[in-house]
Image: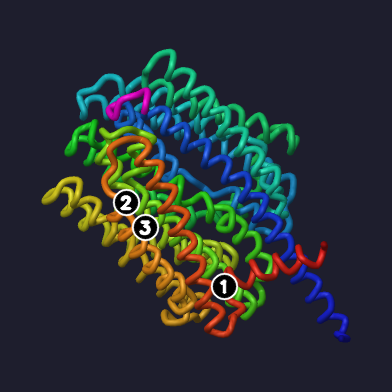
Amino acid sequence: MNFPNGELVKKEHTSSVGSKTVKSTMLLLLGVFYSRIINLIMTILLARILVPEDFGLVALGTTLLLIVNSITDISLASALIHHKEVTEEDFDTAFTLSLMRGLIVSVVVILGGAYMAEIYSDSRLVAICFGLSLRPLVASLSSPRYVLYSKELRFGTVALQESINYTAQFLISVSIAIYTQSYWAIVSGAVFSSVIGTTFTYFVAPYRPTFSLASWRRLLGFSFWLTLNEFLTIVGNRFDNFLAGSWLGLSVFGAMNVGNNIAGVVTQSAVAPMQRVLFPSFAQIAHNRDRLKVAFQKSQASLFTLGLAVGVGTALVAEPFVYLTLGPNWPVAVLVIQCIAPVLGAQVVFGPVNAICNAVGATKVLFYRGLILVLFRVPIVLAGLYFYGLPGILLARIVSGGVVTSAANFYLVRRLINLTVFEQIFVTWRSWIAGLCMTIFCLLLGRYLGPINNNTDAIVLISIQASAGSMVYCLVHFGLWWGAGRTDIGLETEVVKMLSKLKSKR
């Protein structure tokens, strides 16, 4: 078939971007999967060695660090990705601004640690926050040129760096935990992994540190609203940690954070690589809104297919999984995973929203969305915690993370690329039905297999429920796709294409 020259170039560019995106996603999938598995194993081993109170103490310091980080986050990497042409002045300015921010964050975290120690009447928080303050300082020294790997969709190196970071954190944290049985294992592992990560950036993206602020307007002009949005997001998602730490007690709060970590690690393993390649991929087709709309729906459908399956599946096997890995004395972690994992899994359907906003330069609307979510979430969570304690805060997270977040993102997508709410929901209908079938099947199977009395029971229950549930989900999903006319929008289409290519190569 013959194309005009311009159309041929467009086709070749589309194919190039698409193939790069798929390849990058696969590389990131391998790297992130390894990193998440290592992180999960580390959490399990530390939970076996340490006590919930240790996790609670470090979680308080980490929450402070995250909030201060978000307040000062100037999204320099996103700005460098967004701009088509990047100069040496841009890199020098990014390095200078990053170092200034790192110093500010470190100082504020140290001062905040002393203040928290007074509030919680626990002097250990002073030393913990001082240790954690080294992490942003070390990270701020990273080579600014390293962002080119993401900008050019060369995510193999990015995946390698993260794998090395998590491996180092795992080895240091577990070793120190075995030797000291102290919360310092968590802090030391986090700081040491930052040292490894920063060093790695200079090996793969050499850069001679140079101080300059010549391009500060160019970089901050794009990232200003991203900074405000990041602040609102972190505050909205983490502010309750400070209240829960004192209201529920450090032991319950620590167990709650272990459950949160497990739910987050498992649900994000499969979908995180796809989310991270969307921004640079969308940025290359941002000028064509029709192509952007189709790409958004395809990514939305694929992410939700994986996210819902992993989230609901994690909740269904939470009890035997926690019994087998952490032991029988972590009922709080089981409850948290059962409540939070499905919400986190379903939320990935909105992963492409941030990428769309960044790609078209509509970062200001992200701030308004974050503001709306905080205004709704804060009173809901406060009411839940005050009246019902732990169950209340979990219910509040389900409502705010499910209903409120969905409504805000539906509206945002409609405004940006003119996709109606029905069009956004419709691409996920097969996943909802498949997820419901999987849930009913696994619950009936769990009742038939009986209660968990030992590790053998837990292994049997996990193995049968995970394998049978996955099979039911995939069969129902594929059957619905086939019966509905094999639409191009969906993960099934990409899987069939991939299998066809593999078959043709033989």
Say if 25 sits above or below 95 in the image: below
Quick one: label 1, few (<14), some, or many (20+) residues within 10 Å? many
Q: List the residue tagged with mark 3.
A: 342
* Percent coordinates x, y for residue 26 in the rendering: 66, 54
Question: Cα distance, mark 1 to mark 2?
Answer: 34 Å
Residue at x 71% of width, y 33% of height: 202
Q: Which residue is mark 2?
A: 449
Amino acid at pointer 2: Leu
Q: Amino acid at mark 1?
A: Gly
| Residue 363 in sight in this render | no
Q: Nearer the viewer, residue 113 or 152?
A: 152
Q: Quadrant of the C terminus?
A: bottom right
> Residue pushed farthest top?
179
| Three-letter amino acid code of the residue under disc 3 | Pro
Which stretch did the figure color magenta?
A: 48-53
Q: Give how far apart the Cα atoms at labels 3 and 1 are.
A: 20 Å
- Residue 5 vs residue 306, the one in the foreground: 306
Q: Earlier in the sequence, mark 3 or mark 1?
A: 3
Instruction: Say above or below: 50 vs 430.
Output: above
On screen, residue 421 above or below 344? below
Q: Nearer the viewer, mark 1 or mark 2?
A: 2
N-term-proximal mark, 1 vs 2: 2
Q: How many marks?
A: 3
Q: Position of residue 372 (x, y in %)?
A: 33, 64
Q: Nearer the viewer, mark 2 or mark 3?
A: 2
Where 320 sits versus 502, above or below?
A: above
Q: Is residue 176 left or right of residue 4?
A: left
106 horizontally vs 401: left or right: right
> Which label was assigned to residue 23?
none
| Residue position marked by numbered label 1 in the rendering | 490
